[in-house]
Image (tube, helix red, strand yellow):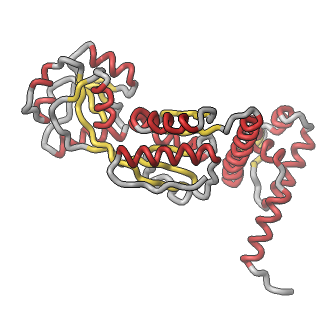
Amino acid sequence: MHPVDPVDYKRRSKRSLKTRLKTRQLLLLIELDEQRNIHRAAEEMDMTQPAASKQLKDLEELLDVQLFERNTRGVVPTIFGEAMIRHARMALATLSNAHDDLTALKAGLVGQVNVGAIMTPSVTLLPKAVTRVKDDSPLLRIGIQVDMSNNLIGRLQAGELDFVIGRLFEQQSKSMFHYEELAGEPLCVVARIGHPLLKDPNLTLERIARYGWVLSPPGSVLRHKFDLMFRRNGIEPPNNVIDTSEIPVISELLHKSDFLHAFPVELASNYARLKIFAKLPIELPCEMDAFGIITRQNQLLSPGATRMLNAIRSVAADIYPRPLPTIQP
């Protein structure tokens, strides 16, 4: 018996998986994960339970692992099953995106691009990039989701977003994502137009600590850095605090009181220009972690997503100090 070449075996195993794996099996995996019952999953798939059981058995034999544990209440994914379900969702999301792109092209459009962004770039960077893309490609459909980085990265991993403008934290797998840093995010203090502190050129941390504040909730990155700023300077953080991250609530509270709020400088400048808030004359020794462009490793972007990404890089080069590379569609 000839020795097995492990590299050749791995290559043949991958080829076998690609040729024998069926889309219907991937759909069954997702239904089993959602229903946790093979009978109900089979009903959702419009197939008999024996047929569903056979498809699952065939898939487990193909992968040489047990994907679900059977018990009296139904089925529960094993660690192998959870991994395969995650990849199944990503694969089906990619197929769905391909279908959407083809449908758009047949309708005379040029496709769909879905972008996720944290708050600051969603207000300052993205609108300029979207305007630039729409000037050249008015029929490109652009979807924008604004959320915290962790939530957006989860959607990126699931294939729901083409790319994200946000923060990549240490606990997230760097092997799964590619990160291009765009800018840091220093903080400043904002208040209502006409606030009494706007006329004080000698503001100190001690003085503003005595005011009421509207702040991101405890546990958030911004709140941690804000409280740490005071403690590093030997000052107790403000104790008259309202906890919220909702911009409409923050806006109303500031307009109707003398409360203060910590805001990214770039975002605050935008609101000050629109005369919504005013920046206090104090420079905070506090900065959020840098944000950047996050894509999945080895991801093939659609022409529309590539166009959008290049526009973001181009606008970022105008806004932020260092030049950034572009990619070809």
At 36% across and 26% down in the image, what residue appears? 244
Q: From the viewer's side, name the closer residue of 46 and 249.
A: 249
At 84% across and 59% down in the image, what residue appears? 19
Q: Where does residue 99 sit, x and y in percent of width and height?
A: 75, 40
Q: Where does residue 287 sit, x and y in percent of width and height?
A: 28, 44
Residue 2: image quadrant is bottom right
The single residue placed furthest to the left in the displayed view is 202
Q: Where does residue 200 sit, x and y in percent of width and height?
A: 9, 27
Q: From the viewer's side, name the closer residue of 132 and 183.
A: 132
In-image side of 179 versus 212 (left or right): right
Residue 42: image quadrant is top right
Q: Where does residue 135 sit, x and y in percent of width and height?
A: 53, 35
Whether residue 73 can be seen here? no
Whether residue 246 can be seen here? yes
At 37% across and 19% down in the image, what residue appears? 249
At 7% across and 33% down in the image, what residue appears? 202
How many callouts does the rendering have? 0
Q: Quadrant of the N terminus?
A: bottom right
The single residue placed furthest to the top in the displayed view is 256
In-image side of 287 versus 69 (left or right): left
The single residue placed furthest to the bottom in the displayed view is 2
Q: From the viewer's side, name the closer residue of 310 and 37.
A: 310
In-image side of 254 versus 120 (left or right): left
